[in-house]
Amino acid sequence: MNHLPKHVRKRLLLAAKLLVFGLVVWFVRGTLEDAWRQLGEHEWTLHPWWLLAACGLYLLGLLPAGVFWWRILRVCGQDARLSEILRAYYIGHLGKYVPGKAMVVILRAGLIHGRRVDPGLAAASVFAETLTMMAVGAGLAAAVLAVYVREEQGLFWGAIGLAVASLIPTIPPVFRRLARWAGVGRSRPEVRESLQKLGYATLLSGWIGMVLVWCLLGLSLWATIRSLGVDSLGPWEHFTGYVAAVSLAMVAGFLSLIPGGLGVRDVVLLRMTARLLPLSAGEAALAAVMLRLVWLMSEIAISVILYFCFYPKCRDDEIPTLPRSCSSSP
């Protein structure tokens, strides 16, 4: 595309961004409508402060995962700012509602693309961060099921399988080989060599951070249940149940490749809450739908704030590629 006139490139870039924006809005709208329709099938009361707490815990819970993504890029020699990485990370979550999950990679890599971050390595690092999160989540769910619900062999072995399937591609030698097969660093030998710096110490730090992620997301489920007027559950007495329910549901939804895990995530969450938490069938169903709505609204709110209010400035050695990602150079 570099041989095209500058004004043509600008128009093509604008058209591509508008297309991406339109796709995200369209599929997010469908998810919102479906969640709201399901809520209409139940009688419920709402406690706004608990709802805000659920949103806050969810967004806070995602923070260690975003930091881990930044750490992967830094270890691989990319000059990535933490602020712009977190901005791209949170906004990128909206891409999971578009079929195929590829939009997550497009949004994240597009928002940090520039001279300081290789686009191929940016895309590969998204997979490394996401699969690490899924592997730890499935492993935690399997551990809880093994201790507390031994008769659920199907769920247990399913969790083990999901953990292994997510873990293998993140093992440093495997990840480096997959990245090379995908063409990362094909035209830039220094990028290919930087992949050698990604070792087990980085992966271990990711595991530790992801445990914190799932703990906070589990507490977000608890706050969501409280927002529906169920005040008989405390945060700690059923803590492992919250974590296992959320983690296995999200992992199953992610690996299903269905936009937002719609249906799959809800079914798994419903079954896990029924097995691990003292909720009625109606309360469990309502909690599953409300959790989807709470998390989606949180993602929309933080994305709007970060995209329009907190876009980083370009340094003198950079060429702006996204108008909203960088302010115009003098």
Image (cartoon, helix red, strand yellow):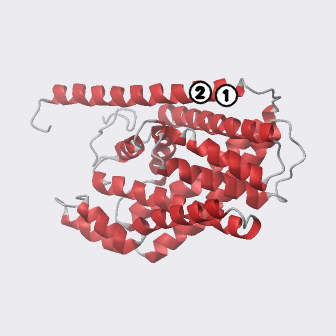
Q: Quadrant of residue 146?
A: bottom right
- Which residue bears the numbered disc 1? 38
Residue 212 visible here: yes
Residue type marked 2 = Asp
Mark 1 residue crowding within 10 angstroms, few (<14) / some (14–19) / many (20+): few
- Which residue bears the numbered disc 2? 34
Element class at badge 1: helix
Q: Quadrant of residue 72?
A: bottom left
Name the foreground residue: 175 vs 110: 175
Residue type marked 1 = Gln
Relative to 17, 2 lies left or right: left
Name the foreground residue: 107 vs 168: 168
Q: Which residue is outermost to the right?
A: 232
Q: Position of residue 107 (x, y in %)?
A: 40, 41
Name the foreground residue: 22 vs 282: 282
Compute the Cα span from label 1 to label 2.
6 Å
- The relative height of residue 151 versus residue 108 in the rendered view (above or below) is below
Element class at badge 2: helix
Q: Looking at the image, do the residues carrying marks 1 and 2 touch, with CB atoms under 8 Å apart?
A: yes
Q: Position of residue 42 (x, y in %)?
A: 76, 27
